[in-house]
Amino acid sequence: MSNDALLAVSSHSVNDYLACLQVVMVNTTLPANIGSAARAMHTMGLSRLTVIDPKLPIDETSVSHAAGGNELLSSALITPTLESAISDCQLVFAASSRSRHMPRPVVTPTQAAKIMFDFIDAQAALGADDSSVDTSSATSNKPNIAILFGREDRGLTNEELAYADYHIQIDANPAYPVLNVASAVQVIASFIFAYAQTHIQTADNLDSDASTDAQSTINVNLRQQWDEPAINQQQLQQLTQRTTDLMVQRGLANNEHLKSLPSRLSRLGSRLQLDQKEYQLLSALIAKLSKD
């Protein structure tokens, strides 16, 4: 990492990190829970709330439960579909109380926070390193990270969980590990806020050590630390659909009996965490094979 990149990372404040995160509530039943989630978010420094197709609109009970989070509640985005809400997200997490038929990597709230903040740091370093920035890229280096929360009665569907790169599970009584949705927001947000304090201090210490430590170290590359920005959810789903269509066209899959093929392809893309150049290469390859 260059000196400019290291400076860009170490100059991040807690609010800079938290501003990259949005809480997404899917098909919430009770308006009061939306207000309670807004209060929980405000308490832990999160400011971006998106509500997907709520069963009832935000009302007076939402406001009364939001308390100090009223401004956050009034600025909440209401959207009809999950796809539109996360289309420009490069990283998606989903709160899930149990493993599903098509499992994704499961992390604790603290592990999730580490993945989020390391990803943000990597994107900041990419933007600070002039030699690695493709100015023609339409994707901003500022990450957009979503955390999905499901319905009060049944959480997120398998299809909705399939959009997530990681599932977050909270340690709880195994006999009944299900939290109220607003409580889940509070718990996960508190872990993220707590991790933010430690992460900022660690970054400051690394910056200080870098100026005095002349010993070279191995440059370890995590998957998020490549030379191009990561693709977003819309691009991942487009690539999944194009690959599925190609396999059907080539007789490798039956359009009437796809079963879990799209979900497996989507999970594969999440595991690879493709960047913009890789996405362009694969898109060109699929287009060529589709024409031949």
Image (cartoon, rainbow, N blue to C red):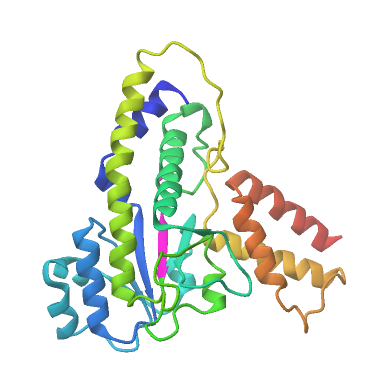
Left or right of residue 127: residue 64: left
- State whether residue 143 appears in this view: no
Q: Can residue 132 be seen? A: yes
User: Residue at the spot x=32%, y=77% of the render?
Assistant: 180
The front one of 205 and 120 is 205
Q: Residue at x 58, y 74 (%)?
A: 100
Picture quadrant where residue 214 is located: top left
Percent of width and height locating residue 174: 45, 73
Q: Can you say which quadrant of the picture contains the C terminus?
A: bottom right
Q: Residue at x 85, y 69 (%)?
A: 252
Left of 247 or right of it: where is 280?
left
Where 217 sits versus 138, above or below? above
Q: For this rendering, which residue is in front, 86 or 224?
A: 224
Q: Classify 214 as above or below 169.
A: above
Depicted 258 relative to depicted 38: above or below: below
* Residue 14 location (% of width, % of height): 26, 44
Residue 276 appears at what percent x and percent y?
58, 47
Magenta highlight on residue 144:
yes
Q: Which residues are magenta?
A: 142-148
Q: Nearer the viewer, residue 109 or 261?
A: 109
**x and y percentages locating residue 57 in the rendered image:** 27, 86
Total numbered labels: 0
Q: Position of 7 compared to 46: left or right?
A: right
Residue at 19% across / 68% down in the picture?
Answer: 39
Q: Is residue 65 one of those drawn in magenta? A: no
Quarter where residue 265 is shown: bottom right
Position of residue 135 relative to residue 147, above or below, is above
